[in-house]
Image (cartoon, helix red, strand yellow):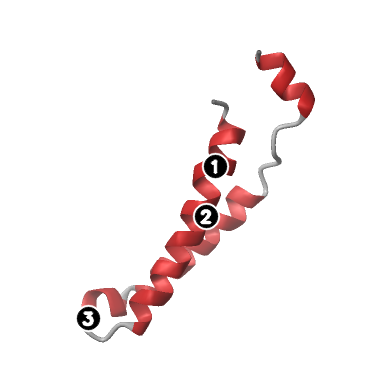
Amino acid sequence: MSFRAFNRKYLEPGTILMMVFGIAALCQPWNLFLHRYGVTIILIGLVGFMIASKIPPETQADQGAQQ
């Protein structure tokens, strides 16, 4: 599995889930630690998604060269 395929399959969805987790951490009233760092979690997920989304997907020529 190439880095581009790994990025498309795991990193992009992982950063989206991190942003959703940050929003959930801000909305919950039980854990002060999660509430305190919810915005930080969202920002880390956002920066990660911005970086991961700039990596182009594999093209047909890239896939043929690896086989």
Query: Crowdedness of circle 1 by 10 Å Cα count: few (<14), some, many (20+)?
Result: few
Q: CA distance from mark 1 to mark 3?
A: 33 Å
Please indicate whether residue 31 sits to the left or right of residue 24 in the image: left
Q: Which circle's residue, 1 or 3, is located before the other in the chain?
A: 1
Amino acid type of the residue tagged 1 in the rendering:
Lys
In-image side of 28 versus 39 (left or right)? left
Q: Which residue is mark 1?
A: 9
* Circle 3 SS class: helix
Check disc 3 and report the residue beneath it.
32
Q: CA distance from mark 1 to mark 2?
A: 14 Å
For the C terminus, the image quarter is top right
| Above or below: residue 43 compared with residue 57 | below
Q: Residues within 10 Å of mark 2 (few under 14, many from 20)?
A: some
The N terminus lies in which quarter of the figure?
top right
Q: Is residue 39 visible?
A: no
Callout 1 touching callout 3 (CB < 8 Å): no
Residue 38 locus on image (x, y percent): 37, 74
Which residue is painted at 72% across and 15% down in the image? 65
Write down the quadrant of residue 35 in the picture: bottom left
Residue at the spot x=22%, y=81% of the render? 32
Tell me the residue that label 2 is attached to.
48
The kind of secondary structure element at disc 1 is: helix
